[in-house]
Amino acid sequence: MPTDTTSPGAVPGSRALAHPDREEIRLADVLHALADPMRLRIVCRLAAADGELSCADIELPVSKSTCTHHYRVLRESGVIQQLYRGTAKMNGLRSADLEALFPGLIDGVLRAADRQERRLGGR
Amino acid sequence: MPTDTTSPGAVPGSRALAHPDREEIRLADVLHALADPMRLRIVCRLAAADGELSCADIELPVSKSTCTHHYRVLRESGVIQQLYRGTAKMNGLRSADLEALFPGLIDGVLRAADRQERRLGGR
């Protein structure tokens, strides 16, 4: 069952966002979530930040609604957690869950993304 | 430019299938190709076989046309090569290309798939 995640600083109730529990996370969903250049960029930034970032902290060359869509795909697949702190929606990698389920997978994908970025220079 | 791959034993000409060159392979396309349980199963089988298998060698609980679609997605993303040998369409992982572009990525995904399979028992 997906759970509404609340935590200190989050606004409980209607604004809590649904997340899959760890045991509901599936590899195919995670790979699908990562299979997009914008979503890969979000994950790279969150991994580099090693903490929470707001959506505004990560600039993407897409519309706000497309941006919202990408974050939702990442959240619903179990790759990131999102919660409201006041008016800001904060995002963080679910590193502990992903590492427990698929050790080394996210690091491997991030290394591949970095390598491609250096090879193609953003093409 | 995608190239028509021919090789010894392959029928040249109209039955050759289009493949991306190594430098055209993109991480997002590879991850999308892997983001499906049936396609993951094909890749696991090809990796375990460490050689070519025909489509008939890999049983999948889906229709023939769906099966053909999955192989096409894998081929067009650069994950597998497909060629006709006589009347059989043979499939092989493009391990050298993938390893050169994204070292360790496919192995990491295969390990994750194996881990999930053992955890869920096919669920």
Image (cartoon, coloured by chain):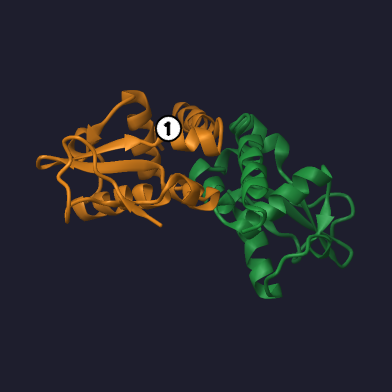
Chain colours: A orange, B green
Q: Residue B96 in the image: x percent, y percent?
A: 71, 35
Residue drawn at 71 percent across, 43 percent down: B94
Total number of numbered discs in the rendering = 1
Q: Check the image and name the residue furthest to the left.
A: A87
Residue drawn at 57 percent across, 53 percent down: B33
* Residue A1 falls left or right of residue A103: left
Q: Residue B38 in the image: x percent, y percent?
A: 64, 59
* Residue B122 falls left or right of residue A42: right
Quick one: B113 or A85, which is closer to the camera? A85
Q: Is residue B50 above or below residue B16?
A: above
Q: Is residue A47 above or below residue A87?
A: above
> Can residue B76 be seen from the camera position used here?
yes
Q: Is residue B104 above or below residue A35?
A: above
Quick one: B58 or A23, which is closer to the camera? A23
Assess disc 1: are there few (<14), some (14-19) or many (≥20) residues with their C-alpha within 10 Å of its C-alpha: some
Q: Could you tell me which secondary element the residue under label 1 belongs to?
A: helix
Quick one: A37 or B112, which is closer to the camera? B112
For badge 1, the amino acid type reads Ser
Quadrant of residue B107 within the rendered picture: top right
Q: Residue A100 in the image: x percent, y percent?
A: 52, 34
Quadrant of residue B37 within the rendered picture: bottom right
- Image quadrant for the C terminus of chain A? top left
Chain letter of the residue beneath label 1 in the structure image: A
Residue drawn at 70 percent across, 59 percent down: B17
* Residue A118 falls left or right of residue B72: left
- Image quadrant for the N terminus of chain A? bottom left
Q: Which residue is mark 1?
A: A95
Q: Is residue A73 above or below residue B11?
A: above
Residue drawn at 48 percent across, 47 percent down: A30
